[in-house]
Amino acid sequence: MLNTKTARRSRPWGTVLVATIVVVSAAFFSWELEKEASQRRHQQERMATSEQLNAIGARIQGTILHDIALTTGLAVEIAINPDSASDEFSRYAGVLLSNSDTTIVHTAVTQNLKITKVYPLAGNEEILGVDYRDYPVQLKIIETTMKYRAPFVSGPYDLIQGGTAFIIRMPILDEYEGGNSFISSVLDYQSLLDRTGLSDQNHPLAVTISAINPDEKEGRRFFGDAQILDQAPVYMTLQFPVGSWEIAALPKNGWAETSPRFANILPLPLLTLIAAIAVCYFKIRRDKESAKATRILQQSVKRFRSLFENASDGIFIIEQDRGHILNANEKAAQLLGASPEALKNRLFKNQFSTQNDKSIATNKNETTDLSNDATLPGLFQTRLIRDDGKTIPVEISTAKIEDGDTPLIIAHMRDITIRSRYEAELDSARLAAERANDLKSRFLANFSHEIRTPLNAIVGFSEIMRKGMFGEIKPTRYAEYAEDIHHSGKHLLEIINDILDLSRIEAGEMPLAMEWIDLSSFLEDCKRITAQLAKEKTISFACIPTTAPVMIYADPGRLRQILINLIGNAIKFTLPGGSVEVSGIVMENGGVDLIVRDTGIGMSEKHLKDAMRPFGQIASKKSVDQSGTGLGLTLSRALCQLQNIQFSIESEQDEGTIVRLCVMPDQTKLTAMPHAISNLANT
């Protein structure tokens, strides 16, 4: 016990020691990282400054070398024509300099140390005839030029005629006048600075430039602040034929701080310290949670074992890679007719029949091989082979579970023998119902056909008796009976015709005689047939012609049956004094809408659903004729579907009804030219 307590007391100090070492190590590591990062930032800044300095140097060197080349060309011309007049020199110099992008503002020829020619002369008259022997400083530069017999850039100087400039001196190489002849080109100082951008106050670099003559040990600074040289600037040397320029530069605001930043060093050790404290805290917490998790896991295992053993379905635990059964519950053993121990290490897929019953659906891969993840999770039906050789239909659901590095499959198996029997019985009942429905349709069609023959005789003979074609019927009561027989027989014939048509449609035996119909005359025919019925009920009946002459492709007999049926319904359910309107409208897409509109009693949404069912009738308290079989709307809609005509109905109680027949554009065609249609619309 003592040793255990001592060990427990020493753990926090050990953790503190380890945390201290880690924090100190993190601080040292952070210091080194920041120092390296600081050096890297400084190096990147120097590289960026060097790239900018290279651009400046390239522009300076390129400009001066270009002007040296022009000066050399003038020197060659003077060497070839030493006795050329001033006008000839001015003409040549003007042509050469005017065609070049140069900083040369004027040039002069010196013979025997005396200026003899100047271009341009205007503004430079006072230097013509100047003798360099009177200018010791310039004479020293001239001696250097003659010594190296190459172009020499010097300056900047304050010119006699005003301004500041560099001077390029190029010896004339014909030893003319004892070798003291040369040509001088004056470069504008400000123009050179403008070309390089150094005259810009917003330039990002602070630059200093020094000229180094070959006979001098130290250079002469002529541009920039000398303090730049004390701040470890970036250097660049520009080489010229005689001498060189050294350029030094650094950022205008100086180099960025190069020492490690404390703010960048602090986070890592601070975070490490926080992490160490957190580790200590979470370690204690983890130990508590681990103990709790162990208890929960044990309880979960116990619950799973209880569910596994007492489940009503057979459960298998299967090794996915090899497909062997690792464990099975008691119900699974009962399904196979074996003990749970006997099922272990069996190959799972060998427990099933390879020939499935056609009435049993299988999974999409039609296999019980579960080694392929594409089949998981899965649900399929197959036949299980029991140990006694019998097979039973089963339904299996599978899912993948993980147990360490071993992929496992859990499979739930259920005996579906009773369900399969019920499904088979349901399929048989469905087929029987379909056959019965087919027989019903054929029976109605045959029955209606057979009953119409005697019914036509009854209607025909009652018509003869009603009209007294073979003499007056006495007593008159018999004539009234004949009238009733004729009216009832005709009504019954109409009902039978509707039943026959509906049966033929359901049986798919309704013939159609499709042809092109002139819509305007067709609507007039329908109006003539139904006008008398509207007149008897004192209902206003109007037929509005189409907006343009149009023909539609349909069966004229069936379409007439539809319209007369719809008009008859509209008149039937409209009270005296109301109105019924039939119209045809040519739509923008080329289709045609046939509309039957009335101001009758209308229908609620519920009544409308009832009216659209076969034999559906609407009970109304209003004084309207309730006769009929309730097949009118059903038959009309079915006939429209046969002819590819869209049927729709809108109705509101006490507001009337609108029935719309939409003929598709491919079943219509205009019978007049477009301009004629336009004129008709305008009138």
Image (spheres, rainbow, N blue to C red):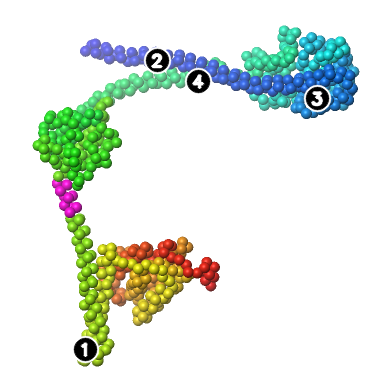
Q: Which residue is labeled 4 in the image?
A: 263
- Pick whichever, 594 or 157, lies toward us: 594
Q: Earlier in the sequence, mark 2 or mark 4?
A: 2
Q: Which residue is labeled 3 in the image?
A: 105
Q: Earlier in the sequence, mark 3 or mark 1?
A: 3
Q: Is residue 64 left or right of residue 346?
A: right
Q: Position of residue 59 (x, y in %)?
A: 69, 23
Helix, strand, or loop for circle 3? strand
- At 49% from the left and 20% from the top, the residue drawn is 264
Q: Which residue is labeled 2 in the image?
A: 22
Helix, strand, or loop for circle 4? helix
- Residues under numbered marks 3 and 1 in contact, where contact means CB atoms less than 8 Å apart: no
- Badge 3 density bin: few <14, some 14–19, many ≥20, Cα 10 Å: some
Q: Position of residue 86 (x, y in %)?
A: 89, 23
- Pick whichever, 486 or 167, lies toward us: 486
**Disc 3 marks which amino acid?**
Val
**Disc 4 marks which amino acid?**
Ala
Q: CA distance from mark 3 to mark 2?
A: 72 Å
